[in-house]
């Protein structure tokens, strides 16, 4: 059997355990010309970790695999070469364990032969290990759906920590939000003259803050989930940047059309629409940046980015809203 280098090479970046972690080395190894009687005698005399398959090896190179169900009824003089599967499922030791298990599933095999970089036979990954890997990866995928990597130390600590520790981790972020509320009141006070000129500005302010926060929350959720899954951050930012700009165009247009129809005053409504566009665009940028920054600082972004992003987005929304209104009205 010839094995290509493509079959042996690791398939992309390794994420967790590799196939080498699950190899059984003490397995029956026979020569191509060894008879069925001799192979059966070998199984009776020696104890192996895995006996469901026999490796047919010549000069260190794997030539094929003989299944125990083919060996037991075979005539005594039949050789391993005539019984073996010449194209078994093989992987390199550095391949990710999940990819290795799925390779066996796709090939319809119950075991995997592991070869080193030179094509020499190392051992078998038995069926029990393959099932264990598939179950482990399944449970990990379920954990990922919740935005938590089970093996991520910070996330696991946040999940298991006692009540006092949880309060200590969360309250500083919420206190920062409380400080932001006070700053927001100060900003509104600074633009009191604008509110006195057009009281309608106060009527639209809550809607602008809510929409900007909603856009930021959507973006932030996707970024945090992407970081937990190990997605490429630059690609995520590009996609969310394009999406955020599109939202910053569509939402103000929808608002302008509906608000003019109900209240008239196209000048005022147009000003609010521009402020809404600026606020939603800023919210998207904040939501893309903060989770990454918090994760880089070694803090769980699922806990820290929410309160910090909310207060930052709200302050930016209020500032941009009154800045645009003051400049245009």
Image (cartoon, rainbow, N blue to C red):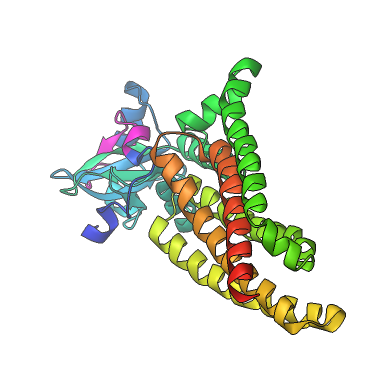
Q: Position of residue 289 (x, y in %)?
A: 46, 52
State which region is magenta.
20-37
Q: Is residue 180 left or right of residue 90?
A: right
Q: Is residue 162 left or right of residue 111?
A: right
Q: Is residue 25 magenta?
A: yes
* Direction right: furthest residue: 262
Magenta span: predominant SS is loop
Towards the viewer: 297 or 1: 297
| Image quadrant where residue 294 sits | top left
Q: Is residue 163 left or right of residue 284?
A: right
Work out which quarter of the rendered image holds the N terminus and state it. Answer: bottom left
Q: Position of residue 123 (x, y in %)?
A: 30, 37
| Image quadrant where residue 200 sits | bottom right
Residue 135 can be seen, yes or no: no
Towards the viewer: 54 or 198: 198
At x 58%, y 35%, the residue is 176
At x 52%, y 41%, the residue is 137
At x 44%, y 47%, the residue is 292
Q: Is residue 114 magenta?
A: no
| Image quadrant where residue 257 sits | bottom right
Q: Is residue 87 left or right of residue 143?
A: left
């Amino acid at each position: 059997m010839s094995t290509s280098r493509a079959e042996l090479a690791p398939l992309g970046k390794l994420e967790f355990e590799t196939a080498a972690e699950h190899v059984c080395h003490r397995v029956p190894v026979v020569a191509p010309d060894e008879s069925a009687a001799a192979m059966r005698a070998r199984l009776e005399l020696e104890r192996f970790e895995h006996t469901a398959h026999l490796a047919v090896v010549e000069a260190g190179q794997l030539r094929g695999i003989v299944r125990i169900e083919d060996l037991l009824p075979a005539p005594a003089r039949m050789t391993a070469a005539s019984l073996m599967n010449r194209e078994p499922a093989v992987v390199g030791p550095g391949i990710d364990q999940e990819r290795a298990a799925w390779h066996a599933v796709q090939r319809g095999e119950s075991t995997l032969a592991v070869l080193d970089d030179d094509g020499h036979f190392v051992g078998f990954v038995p069926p029990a290990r393959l099932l264990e890997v598939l179950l482990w990866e399944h449970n990990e995928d379920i954990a990922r759906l919740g935005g938590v990597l089970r093996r991520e130390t910070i996330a696991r600590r946040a999940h298991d920590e006692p009540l006092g520790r949880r309060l200590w981790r969360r309250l500083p972020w919420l206190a920062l939000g409380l400080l932001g509320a006070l700053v927001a009141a100060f900003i509104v006070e600074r633009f009191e003259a604008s509110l006195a000129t057009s009281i309608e500005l106060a009527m639209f302010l809550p809607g602008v803050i809510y929409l900007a926060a909603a856009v930021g929350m959507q973006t932030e959720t996707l970024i945090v989930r992407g970081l937990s899954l190990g997605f490429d951050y630059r690609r995520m930012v590009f996609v969310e940047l394009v999406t955020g700009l599109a939202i910053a165009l569509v939402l103000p247009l929808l608002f302008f059309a509906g608000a003019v129809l109900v209240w008239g005053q196209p000048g005022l409504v147009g000003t609010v629409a521009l402020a809404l566009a600026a606020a939603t665009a800023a919210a998207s940028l904040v939501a893309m940046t903060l989770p990454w920054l918090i994760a880089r600082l070694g803090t769980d972004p699922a806990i820290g980015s929410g309160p910090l992003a909310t207060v930052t987005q709200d302050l930016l929304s209020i500032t941009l809203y009154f800045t645009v209104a003051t400049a245009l009205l």
